[in-house]
């Protein structure tokens, strides 16, 4: 039985679909739902540079930008979950490698199911099956679901 679900969320469309499906599963099984967002420095830097038109290198302003972007992603995840009937969902903001963060959080929280989007905002190595979803599927000790 599924009693606890963890969703990897980066704000991409596939991660939004994964979150919506996880909300439906949580409702159907009466499972606890939590969300994890672990921003990759290079992803946020790329997005910030594309929007602003200037180089955003590793500095204090860059770290503040990462924190601000992660908080906005967390708000978006809570909004989506609430719209799906899942009020008060906890969003964890991790640091470092998203695969490591998701797997560790799942193990320490006793999660039964990890749900990720097939293709998020990661790098080109995960072009067909996102590098995070692929890594989680290889390393997790619980069930994993990848949503297209």
Image (spheres, rainbow, N blue to C red):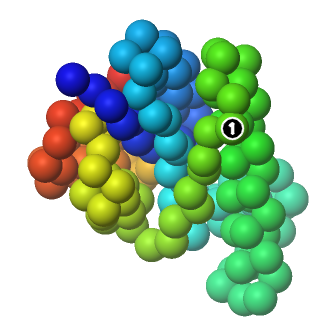
* Quarter of the image where one finds residue 47: bottom right
- Residue 114: tell me if it is visible: yes
Q: Which residue is mark 1?
A: 88
Taking depth in this image into account, of 28 and 84 the one nearest to the observer is 28
- Residue 118: tell me if it is visible: no
98 relative position to 76: left or right: left
90 relative position to 105: left or right: right
* Quarter of the image where one finds residue 31: top left
59 relative position to 119: left or right: right
For label 1, the SS is: loop
Residue found 35% across the figure and 55% down from its top: 109
Where is residue 83 drawn, in percent x and y?
72, 18
In the rendered view, tell whether residue 147 sits above or below residue 140. above
Residue found 62% across the figure and 39% down from its top: 89
* Quarter of the image where one finds residue 68: bottom right
Q: Work out which quarter of the rendered image holds the C terminus and state it.
A: top left
């Amino acid at each position: 039985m599924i009693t606890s679900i963890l969703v990897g969320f980066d704000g991409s469309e596939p991660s939004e679909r994964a979150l919506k499906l996880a909300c439906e599963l949580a409702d159907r099984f009466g499972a606890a739902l939590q969300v994890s967002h672990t921003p990759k420095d290079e992803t946020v830097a790329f997005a910030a540079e594309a929007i602003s038109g200037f180089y955003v290198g590793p500095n204090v302003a860059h770290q503040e930008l990462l924190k601000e972007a992660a908080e906005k992603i967390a708000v978006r995840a809570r909004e989506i979950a609430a719209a799906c009937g899942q009020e008060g969902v906890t969003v964890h903001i991790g640091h470092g490698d998203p695969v490591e963060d998701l797997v560790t959080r799942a193990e320490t929280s006793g999660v039964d199911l990890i749900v990720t989007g097939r293709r998020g905002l990661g790098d080109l190595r995960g072009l067909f099956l996102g590098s995070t979803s692929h890594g989680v599927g290889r390393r997790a000790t619980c069930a994993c679901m990848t949503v297209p």
